């Protein structure tokens, strides 16, 4: 998104609350640079305006969480739960992400250019998480919908207790979690992976060569109509 | 350790006894060790340089250390024992 204004917010001068209040007040189309983040938590959270936000450095927990509109680009690494509960927009991390990247996200695109730690995509409910590198153990745990693309390797218990979410892995899988299974790639899968890799800018992922992981549905207990029986 | 075990051996013994979630930082006279449980539920981040090793639960606590921009910053893997000697 091309910004029409350029705003700089320095974490050395403003509190996190002041940064987020300033972001909420900006008109759609604004370009913002958040400087000296130095690991601060909760930057650029809960925003619904369409901003182009750059966080110039390493950031802390919950970066860009709960957002429904902006595009956020982090020029460094992030702590736990980046883009948790994301509704729409794009969140890109140029470095590594700590645990629970994209937790419970419902939409949008989350791109991690480095590695993601444990439980990436836990309880994912929609949208796409694309990780260029490796992921830690229990990634995709209880993911209900959406797609996870892993360019590198996956650690133990990948896709434990999956529902409808699908995981594609470019590298090796150390082990699958309970009720996760490998499935044959269809032409539709190849098309989806090609699109995701293009959107994420991953040239190292070969869509025909990824491994697909989905639910075996032996533990699948999800009945949307159960409340109507009471 | 009083019986002669070194710090990694002692922590391997601890992991057989401890249940639940934990992240441990143990300092002995000449060594420092860290270990997390198998789920790695409790946060830990390490910044390592040629001059120091710094450990915290959040990077924000390390962000103002001298030279941290050039440090190797990483999260310890679950159940892996990391040690440093003084």
Image: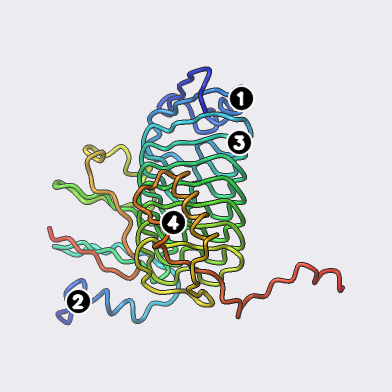
> Chain for mark 4?
A
Give the mark toward the camera: 4 or 3.
3
**Which residue is disc 3 drawn over?**
A69
In the drawing, what numbered circle is on residue B1? Answer: 2
Q: Which residue is mark 1?
A: A28
Assess whether mark 1 and mark 4 are in contact (beta carbons under 8 angstroms). Answer: no
**Which of the pair A153/A207 is nearer the observer?**
A207
Image depth: mark 3 or mark 2 in front: 3
The residue shown at (56%, 25%) is A22
Q: CA distance from mark 3 to mark 2?
A: 56 Å
Question: Can you tell which mark lies on residue A99?
Answer: 4
The span from disc 4 to disc 3 (Cα, nearest Å) is 23 Å
Asked if both marks, 3 and 2, belong to the same chain, the answer given is no
Is A106 displayed left or right of B59 in the figure?
A: right
Q: Are marks 1 and 3 in contact (CB under 8 Å)?
A: no
Q: Residue furthest front?
A: A187
Q: Nearer the viewer, mark 4 or mark 1?
A: 1
Q: Chain of mark 2?
A: B
């Amino acid at each position: 998104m091309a910004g029409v204004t350029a705003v700089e917010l320095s974490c050395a001068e403003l509190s996190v609350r002041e940064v987020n209040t300033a972001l909420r007040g900006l008109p759609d189309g604004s370009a913002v640079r958040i400087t000296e983040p130095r690991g601060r938590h909760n930057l650029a959270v809960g925003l619904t305006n369409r901003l182009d936000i750059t966080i110039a450095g390493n950031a802390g927990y919950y970066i860009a969480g709960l957002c429904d509109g902006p595009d956020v680009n982090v020029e460094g690494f992030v702590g736990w739960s980046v883009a948790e509960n994301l509704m729409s927009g794009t969140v890109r991390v140029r470095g590594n992400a700590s645990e629970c990247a994209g937790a419970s996200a419902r939409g949008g695109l989350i791109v991690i250019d480095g590695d993601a730690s444990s439980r990436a995509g836990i309880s994912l409910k929609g949208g796409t998480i694309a990780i260029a590198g490796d992921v830690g153990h229990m990634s995709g745990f209880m993911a209900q919908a959406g797609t996870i693309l892993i360019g590198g390797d996956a650690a133990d218990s990948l896709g434990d207790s999956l529902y409808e979410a699908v995981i594609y892995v470019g590298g090796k899988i150390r082990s699958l979690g309970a009720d996760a299974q490998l499935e044959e790639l269809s032409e539709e899968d190849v098309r989806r992976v090609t699109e995701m890799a293009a959107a994420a800018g991953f040239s190292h992922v070969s869509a025909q060569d990824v491994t697909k992981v989905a639910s075996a549905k032996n533990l699948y207990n999800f009945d949307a109509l159960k409340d109507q029986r009471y | 350790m009083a019986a002669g075990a070194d710090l990694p051996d002692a922590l391997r013994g601890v992991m057989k006894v401890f249940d639940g979630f934990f992240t441990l930082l143990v300092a002995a006279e000449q060594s420092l060790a860290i270990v997390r449980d198998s789920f790695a539920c409790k946060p830990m981040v390490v910044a390592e340089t040629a001059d120091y090793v710094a450990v915290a639960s959040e990077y924000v606590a390390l962000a103002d250390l001298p030279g941290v921009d050039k440090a190797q910053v990483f999260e310890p893997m679950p159940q892996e024992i990391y040690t440093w000697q003084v």
